[in-house]
Image (cartoon, grey):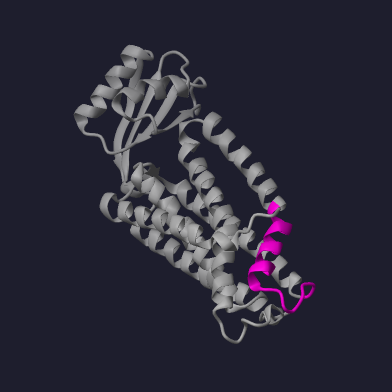
Amino acid sequence: MRFDIVKHHRWWFTLSSILVILSLVSIFTKGFNLGIDYTGGTIVEVQFQDQVSVGQVRSDLEKFGLGNSVIQESTEGHQAGSDIIIRTRNLSASESNAVVASLNKDVGKAAVKRVESVGAVIGSEVTEHALINLAVAFIALAIYISLRFEYRIALSALAAIFHDLIIVLGVFSFFQLEIDSSFLAAILTVIGYSMNEAVVIFDRVRENTHTHKRTDSFAKLANDSIAQSIHRSVYTLTTVLFACCSLYFFGGDTTKNFSLCMIVGFISGAYSSICVATSLWTIWKSHNKNDVRNAGIVAEKN
């Protein structure tokens, strides 16, 4: 017996509403923990007498709460692993001295090559351009889906994408996870995944309008379409989660937030496309007096 997704639409709408409201409350009350790519920071470059690893340096920095700092090896003109560049949040002179002293004591004898403050890599102008590009992408997606299907499907799919973005942002705001330059790439990946899931399901809906009885309800049409495509969605979600979870648990500190953003976004994207977007479209179509008696007249443009 197939699970009736649309029948339980009140559960999906209630759950999504609670998650979205909690996310918005956290966003507006707690804000975000912006990384040094947005706020600027301090660069500390030290040259160790003996070879050391990035892991040793990162472990020592954790006592100062700097475990998520960007740490790189510089081999230019030196023995591999002896020259270490640390890029972290803004540090005072006393904090920088304490970090260098700790490295000398716990990691190895080192000489300071430079300590300097740097501006934000992603300035306000670049951030503004990113937001504009994101808005243009949403408009382009809306036009594409409207031309391929109908405006109700386009709005339902875009609502699901907004749902996913707000939840991802809410998770990062609530737990105060650092947002860096890679976060934008992860967000764009989540948008693409969520849109792909919605297109797959609604494409099946469009195909089924030609094979189902003209007297079938929109709920039956949606449920049958979900049942026919859900295996593909589950396989795709399982595959990407396997890769993202591997990156999260074994990829190191610098990739944790990047992979976590995709993990949350992919789970939310699969859920919203299957449960929220299709239910929203079904309820909308069912309340349209011109469409109630005949599910076979779903507007589409070939």
Which of the two residues, 12 or 166, is positioned nearer the viewer here? 12
Q: Is residue 223 magenta?
A: yes
Which of the two residues, 113 or 273, is positioned nearer the viewer here? 273
| Main SS of residues in magenta | helix
Q: Relative to 27, is 238 on the left or the right?
A: right
Identify the magenta region: 210-230
Q: Residue furthest right?
A: 211
Looking at the rendered image, the quarter that the C terminus falls into is bottom right
Residue 255 drawn above or below residue 28: above
Q: Which quadrant would residue 28 be assigned to in this image?
A: bottom left
Q: Residue furthest bottom?
A: 290
Q: Relative to 5, is 175 on the left or the right?
A: left
Q: Which quadrant would residue 109 be assigned to in this image?
A: top left
Residue 126, given in percent of the width and then of the height, sits at 40, 59
Number of numbered callouts drawn = 0
Residue at (52, 35) in percent of width and height:
248
Which of the two residues, 30 or 86, is positioned nearer the viewer here? 30
Residue at (75, 70) in percent of width and height:
208
Q: Relative to 226, is 283 on the left or the right?
A: left
Which of the two residues, 204 or 109, is positioned nearer the viewer here? 204
Residue at (28, 49) in percent of width and height:
30
- Report if residue 137 is visible in the image: no
Residue 93, given in percent of the width and then of the height, sits at 21, 31
Residue 194, given in percent of the width and then of the height, sits at 57, 58
Q: Is residue 215 magenta?
A: yes
- Report if residue 40 is visible in the image: yes
